[in-house]
Amino acid sequence: MLAIALPWYIMAERATPGFIDYFIVGEHYKRFVEPGWTGDLYGSGHEEPKGKIWFFWLLAVLPWSIILPILMLVRAKFGWEQAKQNHGYTSFAIWWALSPLILFTMSSNILPTYVLPGTPAIGILLAVFWKKKDTIWLAIASMVVPVALIAATYMLATGKIANNSDKAIFETIDPSVRAFYVYPRSYSGQYYSNGQAKVFESDEQVKGLDEFYIISYKDRQRDFIPFKKNYDCSQQAVAESHDRMALLCKIKPTN
């Protein structure tokens, strides 16, 4: 297996120097032990309290995250009998469901989607502990899911749940003026700017411009300090989304 995989890593490192450090050290070590790790090039993990992966699982699997534990307790004897007949299939499904939760319990840099690898096992466990006469549970689930979807849609539409999209920023700012992000750039920013918004890397990017927008998180005001020092930037945000803000910066005239 090493003979097959190793050449690909070597070629990737030669083609894009730093790949091994990013992929091996960053994605497989720093992501788990370094809270708020900012080295993610392709995602947007956020620093969360340790153990919050369980809360994400509770929401992601609703209503089964509530129904399944109850079924497993109520039907413990029945489930044990089933387990003895399926040669370890039940314990395999239990550990399958729990493995991503255990893995990410002590990690702070997580996303809700990290629970997904274990969700198919929920269906297997339901099949193990379910009985044909369990119509009451099916009725509860059939009521909970549509009600929850309607409630979530309402809360998103009315702004009662935070919307992390940067759409509001790009609906407000002048599209003819270049926009830059202090790393990282959001996926929504890339989309709503039609790919025009870039990550600010050096002053060379704004040479020849009269003005530009700089975008970063509201709780990272320090990101704006060098721009206010080197450029004539607005003191207040000219556009905002839920968690980011944009300043308009003008190039200072040279003497």
Image (cartoon, rainbow, N blue to C red):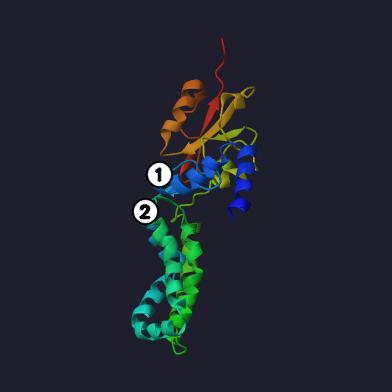
The amino acid pointed to by label 2 is Met
Residue corresponding to mark 2: 106
Dot 2 falls on a residue whose secondary structure is loop
Dot 1 falls on a residue whose secondary structure is loop
Q: Is residue 11 visible?
A: yes
Rendered residue at 36%/57% (across/down): 51
Rendered residue at 60%/48% (across/down): 6
Q: Is residue 186 above or below residue 71?
A: above
Residue corresponding to mark 1: 34
The amino acid pointed to by label 1 is Glu
Rendered residue at 56%/27% (across/down): 202
Give neighbour class at mark 1: few <14, some 14-19, many 20+ (Cα, 10 Å). Answer: some
Q: Which quadrant would the C terminus be assigned to in this image?
A: top right
Q: Is residue 112 above or below residue 6?
A: below
Q: Give the x, y percent position of residue 142.
A: 48, 78
Q: Is residue 69 above or below residue 47?
A: below
Q: CA distance from mark 2 to mark 1?
A: 11 Å
Q: Which quadrant would the N terminus be assigned to in this image?
A: bottom right
- Tell me which label, 2 or 1, sits earlier in the chain: 1
Looking at the picture, tell me which residue is in the foreground, 92 or 7.
7
